[in-house]
Image: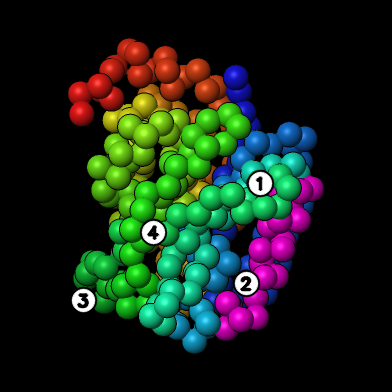
Amino acid sequence: MKIKVVCIQTNSSQFPSKNIKMLDEIFNKIRSPKINLICLPECVAIFSDEKKRINNFLSDWNNKFLELIKYYSRKKRSYILIGSIPQKNKNNKFFNRSLIIDPEGEIISSYDKINLFDVFLSNKEKYIESKNYDSGKKISLSRLPWGNLGMTICYDLRFPLLYKKLAKKGAHFFSIPAAFTYTTGISHWESLLRARAIENGCFVFAPAQCGHHDNGRRTFGNSMIIDPWGKILKRAKHSIGSISCDIDLEKVNFYRKRIPAMTKY
């Protein structure tokens, strides 16, 4: 069985109105008649570390953004992965939440990012995601009509046991929406994505943010679709747009039989 997967690459802003306009334009350029899954990157609706801006998004823009995605899921008869949007927690913080919308426009799966991006790359470049966000507590496997999708987000990529758990629960694919920094991306992004695919015999769908953002961040881009052998099937560069690929689901079992690493843990 084969399915078509699309990964969208964005340069999201602090301003939700700009992000909605950008996504509307990208969706309208996707002409494939039948797409099974469309994947959006992390922080796709709002790219900001400011709590006030995030709260304003939730009060003024969250429903508008979701309605846009639901509209295109129905129009294209596709499942859509929202890489992440903020969702309010009870303690005045947020969860960095990934959602899957089905072709009827219904939310069918969610995942709250477990591993938060608290890193110190240099005196000038540090990130404390836990300042505004809480960690999720549960792994999430979405059972789609053509296979099981293990849901993760960005920095989760550096924690291989999470992916092993998802694979052992039956994942055939991993979604890894990201806003990978340029600093780490240029050295680690491809290596980590291919490693997660190879060690678990899974496809990897990795839609990413790209370029210079209006909050001062710079992200690496290079969205990828990778097969269970670690082969990069499609790769974006550093600009806004999309990549697409036909996925042969039989490759999961084929490569797992050749290298039965899943039985050793």
User: Which kind of residue does numbered mark 4 sit on?
Assistant: Lys
Number of the label disc, if any, that sits on residue 161: none
Left or right of 21? Residue 199 is left
Alpha-carbon span between mark 2 and mark 1: 18 Å
User: Which kind of residue does numbered mark 1 sit on?
Assistant: Asp
| Element class at badge 2 | helix
Q: How is the image coloured?
A: rainbow
Which sits earlier in the primary sequence, circle 3 or circle 2? Answer: 2
Extreme residue in the front direction: 90
| Residue, disc 1 | 102
| Residue, disc 3 | 123
Of labels 3 and 4, the one closer to you: 4
| Residue, disc 2 | 62
Is the Cβ of the residue at disc 2 closer than 8 Å to that at disc 4?
no
**Crowd tier of the residue under label 4, counting other residues whose Cα lies within 10 Å: few below 14, some 14–19, many 20 or above:** many
Which sits earlier in the primary sequence, circle 1 or circle 4? Answer: 1
**Crowd tier of the residue under label 1, counting other residues whose Cα lies within 10 Å: few below 14, some 14–19, many 20 or above:** many
**Crowd tier of the residue under label 2, counting other residues whose Cα lies within 10 Å: few below 14, some 14–19, many 20 or above:** some
Asked whether residue 102 is drawn in magenta, I would say no
Which sits earlier in the primary sequence, circle 2 or circle 1? Answer: 2
Asked whether residue 74 is drawn in magenta, I would say yes
User: Which kind of residue does numbered mark 2 sit on?
Assistant: Asn
Measuring 46% from the left and 19% from the top, which residue is drawn there? 251
Magenta residues (range): 56-75
- Image spot of residue 157 (x, y percent): 33, 48
- Image spot of residue 111 (x, y percent): 45, 54
| Residue, disc 4 | 113
The answer to whether residue 240 of the structure is visible from this angle is yes
